[in-house]
Amino acid sequence: MTRASTTPSPTFAPSRRGFLGLSLAAGLVLGLEACGGTSTLGSGGSSGSGGTGTIKWAWQLPTTWDPVTSSAGSDVQMLALTYDAITALDDQGNATPWLAEKWAYDDSGKVVTFTLHEGLKFSDGSPLDATAVAKSIERGRTQDGSLIAPQMATIKSVRADGDLDVVIELTEVDYQYPLLFAGKTGMVVNPAVFEKDVDSLATQPAGSGPFTLTAYVQNDHATLKKNPNFSAADEIKVENFELYPQPDPSTAVAAARSGQFNLVRLGGAQLQQAKDAGLDVQVISTMFVSVLDVNASMAPFDDPAVVEAMKYAIDREKLKEVAAFGVGDVSYQPFPPGYVGYNPELASIYAYDPDRSRKILKDAGHTSPVKAVFTSSGQSEAAVELIQAQLKEVGIEAKIESIPPTQHTQLVYLEHSKALTYDGFAGRESPVQAFQVLFGAEGLMNPARTTSPELEAQLEKVKKTPTDDPTYPALLQEATKIAVTTFPNTFLTLVPAVIARKGVSGLPTRPSLRRFEGVTA
Amino acid sequence: MTIIRNLWRVPSARFALVVLAVIAFLTLVGGALAPHDPLRQYTDHVLEGPSAAHWLGTDYVGRDVLSRLMAGTRLSVIGAFEAVLIGGVLGVPSGLASAWLGPRLEWMTLRISDTLVILPFTVFAIAVAGTLGNGLQQAMFAIGVLISPIFFRVTRAAALGLRRQQYVEAAELMGATEWWTLRRHIWSKVLPNVAVTSAQATGAALLVVASLSFLGLGVSPPAPTWGGMLASDLDYLAQQPWAPVFPGLLMMATVGSLNLLADAVREAAGDPSRRRSPRRVTVRPEQKEAARA
């Protein structure tokens, strides 16, 4: 049996050639779209162009929401959204009032009394008084696993005197506490929470800061809302705050343009792209300085001549120009200009001098190339490769070893198993604390744990000098000089925060902390 | 030789062979022929576009992109070959043994193969690199181990089919040893399947090597690899949106050619009835009607 007629098949069945042509056309369209330059949207064409009352900050998420167990110095930026510290820092790094209205040391220098503002409240509405502050400090210095306890080792006792005065008795004279309390060490945690369930703090912060956490997905995002009990709640102009990890550099500007985020941290390579895309770009000076962690107990850096040669061999101007696209500045010390610990004598102490570097190596008997391993956890590929090439020019052949960023802390800070590592130092509220981290016997960024009696003695003088004493800056700057000239840590460049904004007003330019008072979205 | 002659008659295979010959040439002498030292940094000419001095431009520290592509071929390709070699060494003998040496070994090799098949390539390679250290050899070992079940299954399937052939049974009945039978009757028949699998697996391994380099595993910088170049190019898309095209094209051409070659080898060495006809057969409408009826 045969059919009288056949109906043409409605199915689309292109030939192989046709299919290939379609595929190429689709690829071309997608490719052109991906390579597209400026946005076709006008500044008002996006739903995320402002007025939403929500800041979407692509920066990073904290290692924990508990300031006592936080393991990253940079966590302070995120923790400051939900916690208030006892003091704050001004642009020069001096302590200024925050929760504490004022403070005073007694004549012996061993007792300091912080007087709180009146009427302070935690985000749950409970009073933030001297008793709560004393309990919070006590927990920070005594809790097992506290990572801020070493900084408060000289505290003998803490007690509340009335509702507003917190009296801290010290085992030795130490005028650094007002500075120290401007960071994680001074963040006040609600005792009602940690006395009931201390583990909950890792995911549910309990402070008095400008925002309260409403949702948190680890490694993904956090959402916060304005805290009406914040002491300066009137100055917080947005209702909601969303926090995300920093996006991939290749997508950061696109993410801001699309409105996915309205506040994004960029690298130097994306700065011009962000401007071209019509975003507001703000470059804020920070305390962050890139640095080489050098383990002076491991070859070849157990030879001081190699360390000195390395310091002269690095062309920091070139690092700034090539790796940072001209953003930031060169640095030979851990503090930025304008900071009280910055020593102008060190402004160009290890200026690029390859001939001198070669001579140092030759005089030390290194006639053949010095072999080394240079560890990188991917912080700045360009800087690492530039440094490697510069070292090779003077006779230090460093083989780059890549480690995952997640292993950096373990391998470099805890196991001290790396001889030379590219790293960054985010700064600390107290310069003495910064010295301890970088050059102290237990300092995380002092891989060989070497100490200098000269520096220790100078830091003792610094601690025993009131921060408003006229001799204080000179003493601190002398400590900086001793540290920079005796320790192998090699400081490279100051790294400002490059921030792209879309529909968000300018951020305050405080170097130590990003704050959001007065910021609109 | 017959297989190669058959291959050369197929246009797609001819194209693939030419491309792979170029890649092989670059693998052998690419670094030596590169116009610049692939590690030399021209820091005053960073992220420049194509020019007479740098035909494909320069990268983020001023290195010549063309030179890095040429020199990077060796590590990218050798890495892939190393993984395939490890996979073949582990998979082929175990596949033959599984079909030949009794049910106990068969059961054991099948279970190991099943276990390896469920492990994802990249994640396993990252775990191995984390345990044994970050290096090309460690990463290739990991990939090779995961590729081995492909060789195992292909070899085993072919060997099982061949074992039931009458001439193999006859050889056994006449007192041939297992080793002689394997060498004489099985291996030559299994080899084309292994060749096809090797070509496809090399393409897959090349992509995995590139993925690992993209993730910063395997080859340490500043040594050039296609995947590593692709990864670093993505950070500078604003300055050089075209840059990822070059390593991407090389990868695409190599993997595509390997796949074309694998198809052609299968056709050239396989069942004659499955070979592609050299000329098209025109079917008349009345023949279609008759066929439908």
Image (cartoon, coloured by chain):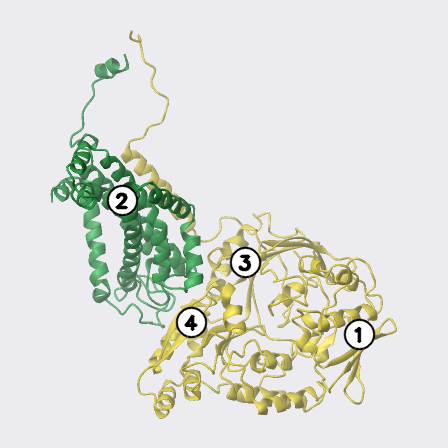
Marks 4/3: CA–CA distance: 30 Å
Marks 2/4: CA–CA distance: 49 Å
Q: Is residue A123 left or right of residue B34?
A: right
Q: Which residue is mark 2?
A: B96
Residue in the foreground of this view, choosing between B210 and B182: B182
Q: Report the mark closest to the observer, 4 or 3.
A: 4
Q: Which residue is mark 4?
A: A384
Of the numbered discs 4 and 3, the one sitting upstream in the chain is 3
Number of other residues with Cα within 10 Å of mark 1, as a class: few under 14, some 14 to 19, many 20 or more: some
Marks 3/2: CA–CA distance: 63 Å
Instruction: State the image coordinates of residue A109 (x, y, percent, origin top left).
Output: 76, 87
Of the numbered discs 1 and 4, the one sitting upstream in the chain is 1
For residue A279, which numbered disc appears in the image?
Answer: 3
Question: Secondary structure beneath disc 2?
Answer: helix
In the rendered structure, the colour chosen for chain A is yellow
Q: Is residue A269 left or right of residue A20?
A: right
Q: Is residue A175 left or right of residue B68?
A: right
Tell me the kind of residue under disc 2. Leu
Q: Which residue is mark 1?
A: A101
Q: Which chain is mark 4 on? A: A
Question: Secondary structure beneath disc 3?
Answer: loop
Q: Which chain is mark 1 on? A: A
Q: Which chain is mark 2 on? A: B
Number of other residues with Cα within 10 Å of mark 4, as a class: few under 14, some 14 to 19, many 20 or more: many
Instruction: State the image coordinates of residue A504 (x, y, percent, origin top left).
Output: 62, 58
